């Protein structure tokens, strides 16, 4: 068996094993996942999702705060004139900023997690390739 044949057989076995394990996993009681099948993601799709998460992260850091100064000024002016809505506006702005920070952190987590997954998968593929290359060479040396 050539290296390419051995490599293809090993990948097919691994894919079948992962698919079998996923099919045996209990259904998500929260209604979150489809039922059926194997893992079918490609690296280009994962990379695109990670890239979009990074873009959203970058935009939220600036665009999520663009009204902060105007809001603070309006709240200050309302409070100065004795309106209770000034304090309420400050509180709403504070909650908004908190939520923006949460979204920025979530986008960073998604982007970083997907980038790590891609890099880790590539490293694992290289190691498997090296292992199988060594086993094919070892076979011919015996």
Image (cartoon, rainbow, N blue to C red):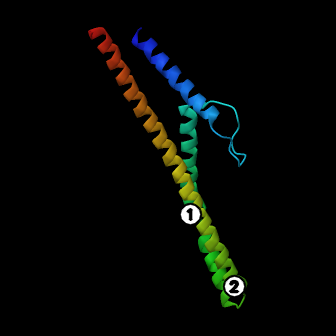
- Answer above or below: position of 17 versus 96: above
Q: Locate residue 42: give its quadrant.
A: top right
Identified at 52% across, 52% down, the residue is 109
Identified at 32% across, 19% down, the residue is 134
Residues under labels 1 and 2: Cα distance?
A: 26 Å
- Answer above or below: position of 141 versus 65: above
**Residue 103 % position (x, y):** 59, 58
**Residue 53 % position (x, y):** 57, 48
Identified at 51% across, 43% down, the residue is 114
Q: How many marks?
A: 2
- Answer above or below: position of 35 versus 90: above
Looking at the image, tell me whether mark 1 or mark 2 is earlier in sequence order: 2
- Answer above or below: position of 7 versus 34: above
* Along the line of sight, the residue nearer the viewer: 59 or 38: 38
* Along the line of sight, the residue nearer the viewer: 53 or 55: 53
Q: Locate residue 62: give its quadrant.
A: bottom right
Identified at 64% across, 74% down, the residue is 71
Which label number is shown at residue 78?
Answer: 2
**Residue 123 % position (x, y):** 40, 33
**Residue 67 % position (x, y):** 63, 68
Q: Residues within 10 Å of mark 2 (few under 14, many from 20)?
A: some
Q: Are marks 1 and 2 in contact (CB under 8 Å)?
A: no
Which label number is shown at residue 101?
Answer: 1
Quadrant that contains the N terminus? top left
Q: Secondary structure at mark 2?
A: helix
Q: Secondary structure at mark 1?
A: helix
């Amino acid at each position: 068996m050539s290296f390419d044949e051995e490599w293809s057989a090993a990948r097919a076995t691994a894919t079948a094993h992962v698919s079998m394990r996923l099919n045996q996993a209990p259904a998500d009681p929260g209604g979150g996942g489809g039922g059926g099948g194997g893992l079918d993601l490609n690296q280009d799709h994962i990379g695109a999702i990670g890239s979009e998460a990074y873009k959203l992260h970058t935009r939220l850091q600036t665009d999520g705060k663009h009204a902060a100064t105007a809001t603070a000024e309006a709240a200050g002016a309302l409070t100065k004139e004795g309106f209770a809505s000034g304090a309420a506006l400050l509180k709403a702005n504070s909650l908004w900023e908190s939520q923006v920070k949460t979204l920025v952190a979530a986008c960073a987590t998604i982007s970083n997690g997907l980038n790590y997954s891609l890099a880790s998968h590539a490293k694992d593929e290289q190691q498997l390739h090296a292992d199988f290359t060594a086993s094919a060479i070892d076979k011919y040396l015996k």
